[in-house]
Image (cartoon, rainbow, N blue to C red):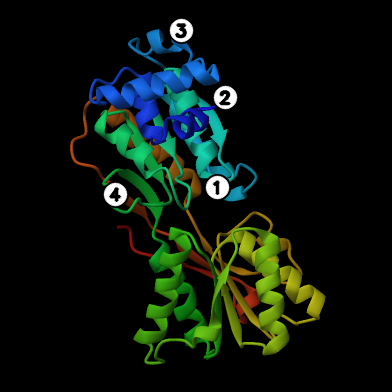
Amino acid sequence: MTIQDVAQRANVSIATVSRVLNDNQRVAGELRERVLMATDQLGYKPDRVARRLRAQKSEVIGLIVADIQNPHFVSVIQGVQDAAYDHGMNIILCDTNEAPSRLAENIQVLRAESVAGLIIVPTPSGNIDLLQELQEDHFPLVVLDRTIEGLALDTVMSDNFQGAYDAVQHLINLGYRRIAGIFPNVQTGIERRNGFIQAHLDAGLGKPSPSLILNGSYRVQGSYEVAYQLFSERLPEAVFTATNFVTLGVIRAIRELGILVPNDLALVGFDDLPWADELFIPYTAVAQPTYEIGTQAVQLLLERINGMAEAPRLVKLPVRLVVRASCGSKQRTISTPNL
């Protein structure tokens, strides 16, 4: 049995169940009784030992990422781990695979383990009530990569808008006009799409045709399918890919269709990776300071744990455009201003 099963049986939110299990007195008596009855009926047993340990000081930080296999998060994890170690802390790592239910379970488990605070990559939808509960309980929390609409939380992220803007502006300066963009429907993808569009507007090109602004997947296969269809119908002059997995899907479509880069199609992607120079054509990419995202998150969390922070803070770290052969120009690096 999980906390979700209890919430469903009691016909209440997961946040309400969590409050009851944590003996939060703000829950109305009738709701409390429904939750307790559901836990009895289902045989749900919260960890009483861990609950008693919560009052003690912890030297453990909980880290919840969206996809542990994504190289972007591998570097973030390393930054969190190194910074935590430098301050005498350890981490417990969890992976949601972008599933709201897994995020809820991870939060429950980590709180039961008496972690001192949480660093979380939110899922694209859901769990706002749980994050709001953490905020209302003054539980130390830092969010990575994505802000939460309606909630002001300590947040560390890259400057997604500026990175996409710089990449597309570079393509425009090279003479490309029919530029496609493929964006996953998550907040980072939306911010990068906005930068993509603004670069066109500032160059006097008007808003790109809707046929060139595509909703991709944050998975390789889904992005491959979108790119394959786009390239098969009418090949654009250039394509901007909003994440590393989108880039991999596009590269697969390019290879299968026999497209030559950059002769037939210029390619610029968000997320620079160690193997970017080793591809059939080294690809131009927006490099994120992933390690620094992790270290900054730990710094903010420790300040929150130690009572040194008041108002929530938003830290946007600058990105760099690393220019390689895939866009048809010589290799160089363009840095954004430090915000």
Identify the disc placed on residue 314: 4
Identify the image quadrant of the C terminus: bottom left
Q: What element carries label 2?
A: loop
- The amino acid type, in three-letter code, at marker 2 is Met
Q: How far apart are marks 1 and 2 (CA)?
A: 21 Å
Other residues around mark 4 within 10 Å, as few (<14) / some (14–19) / many (≥20):
some
Placement of 13 over or under 334, stated as above or below: above
Choose the circle earlier in sequence order: 1 or 3. Answer: 3
Which residue shows up at 51% across the image and 19% down it? 41
Give amino acid for label 3: Val
**Of marks 4 and 2, the one in the foreground:** 2
Q: How far apart are marks 1 and 3 (CA)?
A: 30 Å
Who is closer to the viewer here, 180 or 38? 38
Query: Quarter of the image containing the N terminus?
Result: top right
User: Label 1's element?
Assistant: loop
Under mark 1, the amino acid is: Glu
Question: Which residue has dot 2 on it?
Answer: 1
Query: In which quarter of the view is residue 239 placed?
Result: bottom right
Alpha carbons under labels 2 and 3: distance apart: 18 Å
